[in-house]
Amino acid sequence: MHMQERRPIALHTKIFIGLVLGATAGAIAQSLAKQGTWFTKDQLEAFAKNYASPIGSIFLYLIFMIVVPLLMSALVLGVAEIGQARKFGRIGVRSLLLTIVLSGIAVVIGLVAVNVVRPGDQISGAQKPALIARYRDPERAQKYLDDAKKTPEDPPLLGFIPKNPIKEIARDGLLPFMFFALMFGLALAAIEPERALPVKAFFDGVFAASLKIIDWAMRLAPYGVFFLIFAITAQFGLELLKAVGIYAVLVLAALALHLFVVYPIVLKFIAKRDPVQFFRQIRTVMLTAFATSSSNATLPIALETAQRDLGLPKDISSFVLTVGATANQNGTALFEGITILFLAQMFGVDLTLLQQLQVMGLAIVAGIGTAGVPGGAWPFIASVLVMLKIPPEGIGLVFGIDRLLDMSRTVLNVTGDLTIAAAVSAMEGETEHEVAPSFA
Ligand code: ASP
């Protein structure tokens, strides 16, 4: 009884165990159903659909529940912070532009990669219709069709400005809602600080409470993943997991491309630094990001490294890094793009070019609204899936291996912040890196 007390199993290990056990149990159940001695295929299917899947989805629904307050508070605070840097006007604008450009490139890399490799098409032709049918019941399909018919009378360009934000939230209108939060944050930065302060304190509390709920939801995740994966493999066998493996390799390759090609270009041409030396100087930061999966947890070390090893001016680096820990997440943006499209492919949801562009825009904005904590990307992914009519239960498929991907994308998130800090410092002509030993 006392054995486990000292060394509790880490959550991500438990989630992984949930994945392996769920897949094994599912595969065994599938082969037993084929023999038909204990239960039939239909019975197994009914069990998977009516029990395993709903039980497994509980933690996902908790995550859905918290999307609105989490995004609202994170975006409002993030934007208010950037906007308030009025004395840093130019630095704020430059950081924001670089954030948007780098996140944009990251998402494009992700979208191109997933469209070229199409990991979601890896499952065999025969299984795909079954998978789609299983997750897209006619009632839902009809509801979606009805929704789609209700075309808003607004011209398309204005569709993202909500007339009534509360109504938009109820309709899963993520983009208009994000727009509302962005405007609100800007306004908060524009009014007198004394009056903005209590509102910011309020959102700070909302943010902290939202993170707490995610924390609770995540504790259920290992069990949820077990049931979700069981339900999926019981019906479709292990072949599905092959697609997930290819997806994971694709995510890692795309992240590596951004890390080792895009950042060095910015470093060399804008920050005027030697990329190899830069990476060497920040290696502890990268390792910490990898180990903790959290931009926030890595922030103190990033701040120290920026000033001590990179010789960046204190005011610029503190500002860019602090805001960037939540507001600049290139790795996450790239990951979100790939994951949403991968699941769309798996479930046979054909996204039009316009919808893909919408995913891209959303992922860039979501980079600002994603909390710098392990698994911070999921609330956003979950709600975009719902918006695009992709069965969110599919998350169970990729959740089991998320820890490794989370560790890796967090490295990019943090490296991106440091890259932008170095670039902005160089643009300001304030870089002190010549002082540090270089090209030794
Ligand atoms: N773990 C990431 C971070 O802290 C967020 C995420 O992508 O889930 O930067």
Image: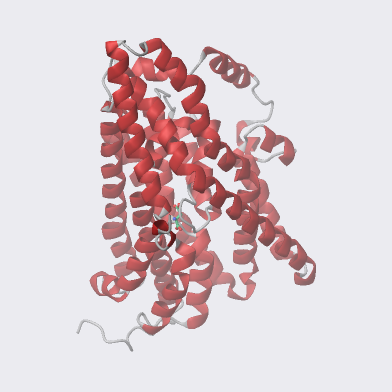
x and y percentages locating residue 14 in the rendered image: 39, 47
Q: Residue at x 67, y 26 (%)?
A: 152
Residue 68 visible, this orientation: yes
Along the line of sight, which residue is nearer the eye, 278 or 226?
226
Q: Which image quarter is the C terminus in? A: bottom left
**Image quarter of residue 160:** top right
Side of 272 where 75 appears, left or right: right
Whether 304 is drawn above or below 343: the answer is below
Side of 403 where 193 appears, left or right: right
Q: Residue extending furthest front? A: 1
Q: Residue at x 38, y 40 (%)?
A: 18
So how many labels did they put on this image?
A: 0
Q: Residue at x 31, y 36 (%)?
A: 244
Side of 143 where 378 appears, left or right: left
Q: Which image quarter is the N terminus in? A: bottom left
Side of 296 where 226 appears, left or right: left
Q: Residue extending furthest bottom? A: 435
Residue 427 visible, this orientation: no
Along the line of sight, which residue is nearer the eye, 169 or 227?
227
Q: Residue extending furthest right? A: 195
Q: Residue at x 36, y 63 (%)?
A: 291
Whether 438 is drawn above or below 253: the answer is below
Please state the quadrant of the image where ligand 1 appears: bottom left
x and y percentages locating residue 110 in the rendered image: 35, 44
- Which colouring convention does the figure follow? secondary structure
x and y percentages locating residue 208 in the rendered image: 63, 59
Along the line of sight, which residue is nearer the eye, 78 or 43?
43
x and y percentages locating residue 12 in the rendered image: 39, 51
